[in-house]
Image: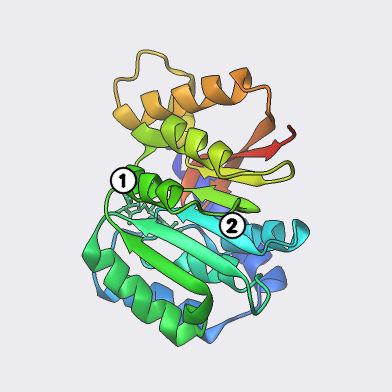
Amino acid sequence: MVKAPLKRWVAVERFIVDHLVSHDAALDAAREANTGAGLPPIDVAPNEGKLLHLLALMVQARRILEIGTLGGYSTIWMARALPADGRLITLELLPRHAEIAQANLDRAGVSPRVEIRVGPALESLERLAAEGVEPFDLVFIDADKQNNAAYLKWALRFSRPGTVIVVDNVVRDGAIIDARDQDPGIQGSRRLFEALAAEPRLTATALQTVGSKGYDGFAIAVVTG
Ligand SMILES: C[S@@+](CC[C@H](N)C(=O)[O-])C[C@H]1O[C@@H](n2cnc3c(N)ncnc32)[C@H](O)[C@@H]1O
């Protein structure tokens, strides 16, 4: 990545955050706890967390599904948009990440609305289906990218017309356009784009993002049928 633009992107992100993302002790504490526990810094940026929060407000989400919890930073942002009787289920592979996330959620006061399910997301999703889970209003996919297309299928299965589906990290420094890139995550996100394009029940787009997380992007889809 070129150095000068990265510096500028980060400065602009700080400007955006300073103006539009109010300081929040619990969110700041979650980030600090994640860093302190040695979690990789792969949570969404603050302005992106706020975007997820706004999307949840826009669709008046009562039920949210997240695939990929890490330390619960994005979870807190989305849970804060829920009404008191709303529900967020977040799926995380690693017990240690889930443990740190739980402490962060407790501190943020959103635990009563959030359930963390630990294990491979594909298995957790099977279990949710067996339990006859109700449709979700918002689904945020942010786990192992090689399974993005499979997660999209599950998101559709757990959707209703109007459900919004967001997938993170779909640009990856532009590597997404390189069909020969053997990275399983890139291949997974390429399959995601193919699935989004082929799915008649969805209409979708993707946005490139820059900032403290580098050059990446989100795919956003809405279930239309
Ligand atoms: C990018 S991080 C999630 C960041 C989080 N959404 C945020 O913005 O704060 C991805 C998380 O997905 C988890 N993960 C990876 N593979 C998974 C799988 N197969 N099932 C469930 N979670 C998985 C990782 O352990 C990691 O905690």
Give the SS element for disc 1. helix
Q: Which quarter shows the N terminus?
A: top left
| Labels 2 and 1 touching (C-beta < 8 A) | no
Instruction: Please provide percent x and percent y for residue 216.
Output: 51, 40
Q: Secondary structure at mark 2?
A: helix
Residue 95 x %, y %? 23, 64
Marks 2 and 1: which is nearer the front? 1
In the image, taking residue 221 as reference, residue 42 lies left or right, namely left
Residue 203: quadrant of the picture: top right
Residue 46 versus residue 18: which sits nearer the camera? 46
Q: Residue at x 36, y 76 (%)?
A: 102
Would you say the beta carbon of the disc 2 residue lies within 8 angstroms of ligand 1? yes
Position of residue 38 measured from the top left corner of the image (x, y, whole percent) = 24, 67
In the rendered image, the vertical position of residue 106 relative to residue 72, given as above or below: below
For disc 1, the marked residue is: 123
N-terminal of the two: label 2 or label 1? Answer: 2
Which residue appears farthest toward the top when viewing the image?
180
* Distance of label 2 from label 1 (alpha carbons): 28 Å
Residue under label 2: 48
- The disc labelled 2 sits on which kind of residue? Glu
